[in-house]
Amino acid sequence: MGTAFADDSPIQVNADQDGNPIPQAPDDADVVANGPVHPDSCQQDSIISITKAKSVFVGDKSKTVHGQSGVTLSVSVAKGHTWTGTFTYAAKLSESIIVASAEETFGGSVSYAKTTTVTLGGSWKVPASQRDGWLALGSKGYSFNWEQGSYNGGCDWRVTNHGTATLPALSPYIAHS
């Protein structure tokens, strides 16, 4: 027998009133596997494996200032300013495949570049307890190792390329140290 209530489905966690997810800051990606797990039927296609992921600040080098103890540092940025992530690799490849794999791993919030949608700025005084410090515009994001490879006929993982990447996930964010 039915009820007079419309829906008994569970309430979505971190959902706004309209049902859309509320943006969350990236957490350490400790749920990412520590290496490729070979599938039941040894996949022959080349894939990207992401390992040792962690949540980091992805700073814009052109919007980073440094100073000594006691100095007040400031940074500002106009709407429309763009900064990018970084990659290292053993052999040149299309970075878009790494970004696509990271988007899949981290839930679509990662990109190669971020653009500010507002004009903003900030300042910070390097404390006396620090010899020097920095202030920077950037975003929260992820740093990780990646491998490109495939399984051979004996289900052994064969690496064809590898490197590191640091990619922005949220925009914008001002950090200091």
Image: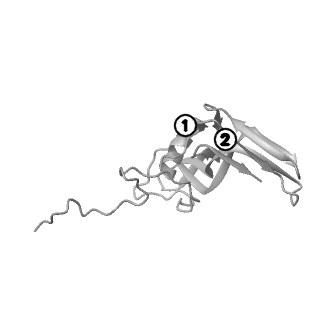
Instruction: Give the crowd class for mark 2: few <14, some 14-19, many >=20 residues within 10 Å.
Output: some
Q: The N terminus is located in which quarter?
A: bottom left
Camera-nearest residue between 94 and 172? 172
Residue at x-position 61% and y-position 31%: 80
Camera-nearest residue between 142 and 38? 142
Q: Which residue is mark 2?
A: 86
- State whether residue 93 is above or below residue 26: above
Task: Name the image quarter holding residue 96.
Answer: top right
Q: Residue furthest bottom?
A: 1
Mark 2 or 1, nearer chain start: 2
**SS of the residue at dot 2?**
strand
**SS of the residue at dot 1?**
helix
Q: Which mark is residue 96?
A: 1
Amino acid type of the residue that numbered disc 2 sits on in the rendered structure? Thr
Instruction: Give the crowd class for mark 1: few <14, some 14-19, many >=20 residues within 10 Å.
Output: few
Q: The C terminus is located in which quarter?
A: bottom right
Residue at x-position 54% and y-position 45%: 110
Q: Is residue 97 visible?
A: yes
Q: Which mark is residue 52?
A: none
Amino acid type of the residue that numbered disc 1 sits on in the rendered structure? Ser
